[in-house]
Image (cartoon, grey):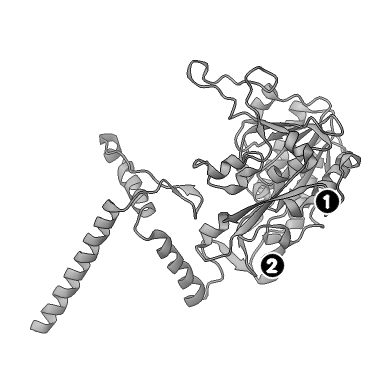
Amino acid sequence: MKECKWKQRITIYGFVLCLVGVMVLMVISPKETVSRAERRRLAEKPRLTAKGLLDKSFMDDTEKYLLDHFPFRDGLRRIKAYFAYDVLQQKENNDIYVVDGHASKLEYPLNESSVKRLAAKMNQLRQQYFPEQTARYAIVPDKNYFLAEQNGFPSVDYERMRSLLSQELQTVSASDSAFAYMEITSGLTIDDYYHTDTHWRQERILDVARCAADALGVGEFLSFSSGSQAAFTQNQIKDFYGVYYGQAALPMEPDTIVYLTSEVTDAARVWSLEENMQSGKNAGKVVLPDEEGAVWKAVYQTEKLEDEKSLDKYDVFVGGASSLQVIRSPKAAAKRRLILFRDSYTSSLAPLLLEAYGEIVLIDLRYIDSARIGTYVDFAGADILFLYNTSIVNHSEMLK
């Protein structure tokens, strides 16, 4: 009996000691504001208020704070991932799976309502801003297109996605020539994408840029051929850990970002709506591209690598996510304009088209309401392209 009581006491004391130890570590350990591995901002310590206690938001926020700042959190997440893969023999962790060194996130099933919603949005924009112009569109395949079905993972029906979008655009549009589909998938392989990230690699999509330029009728102005990098200088950013690296919580070799520069890209400059929103007395006022005091930046913004607000090295391409950007290329062979409805994939594609366009306008409907676009963008005489990756097509509710 005495021996049993001592075992119980040791268990209780050990548990209490561990609990106190964790609490002490929580107090004395330095608090990070961001998780570089997961590429997100960590929860901040909530303020205790009467309202927060009454609506229980204080307890919910405290729980998120404690989970985000738990001691050895990244190590424990890695142990959990190893356990899921090696012990439980799960094929994925947090919806992330790895095949031949390539990490990808499951995207399933096909959301046909989302595809129809995207088509309705595209038709609405055409009727409002460019009713007499033909717009082109393309779908950028995600990594699942090359990995999922071939390795026993569920995936969306890509052919159904494309055909449904085409059908909806033709059905709703007043003219059969309102939208023209641009095929870019056939020339892509899994090696054209980063291992740890969702995006494609700029140095591998010259054939995509050439395909887009030919479809838009400006191919003659590009000095490079498909796959040839002779017209560019390669620049490297090492140790790029993509979005899937942190989510998978598995050790993976980092990628290297290669960005391509030339006299044309060096001379080009980028204006963004967020950078030109004034504060203070003039809060809400925008300094437009042609106005005095407008802020212009380089096409490749390497200062983002040192910016604590930027959690993604991929932001080096035109500065990352932005609601509205204007790229002007004074050394372009033609003075044509391109209006590009885009997502983040286009950040690395647009610089490759600067030889052919004096101005490229990038519009990201995730961050700007479509009703506001006309305030800043003139569509007259411009080429128009919609370029969205599979995830956006399957989750178009994020577009405003």
Residue at image location 79% in from the left, 55% down from the top: 185
Up-down: is 235 above or below 127?
below
In this rendering, position of residue 187 left or right of residue 254? right
Residue bearing mark 1: 230
Which disc number belongs to residue 220? none
* Residue 207 appears left or right of 316: right
- Residue 35: x percent and y percent? 46, 51
Q: Position of residue 90 (x, y in %)?
A: 53, 72
> Separation of disc 1 and disc 2 at Cα?
36 Å
Task: Work out which quarter of the rendered image holds the N terminus and state it.
Answer: bottom left
- Residue on which disc 2 sits: 149
Identify the residue at image location x=65%, y=44%: 344
**Crowd band around label 2 with a 10 angstrom C-alpha radius: few (<14), some (14–19), many (20+):** few
Identified at 69% across, 38% down, the residue is 299
Sooner in the amino-acid sequence: mark 1 or mark 2: 2
Would residue 335 be seen by someone viewing this image from the given angle?
yes
The image shows residue 313 at horizontal and vertical percentages of 59, 48
Q: Would residue 82 appear left or right of 358 to someone viewing this image?
A: left
Tell me the quarter of the picture where residue 357 sits. Answer: top right
Task: Return the residue found at the far left.
Answer: 2
Q: What is the three-letter code of the residue carrying label 2? A: Glu
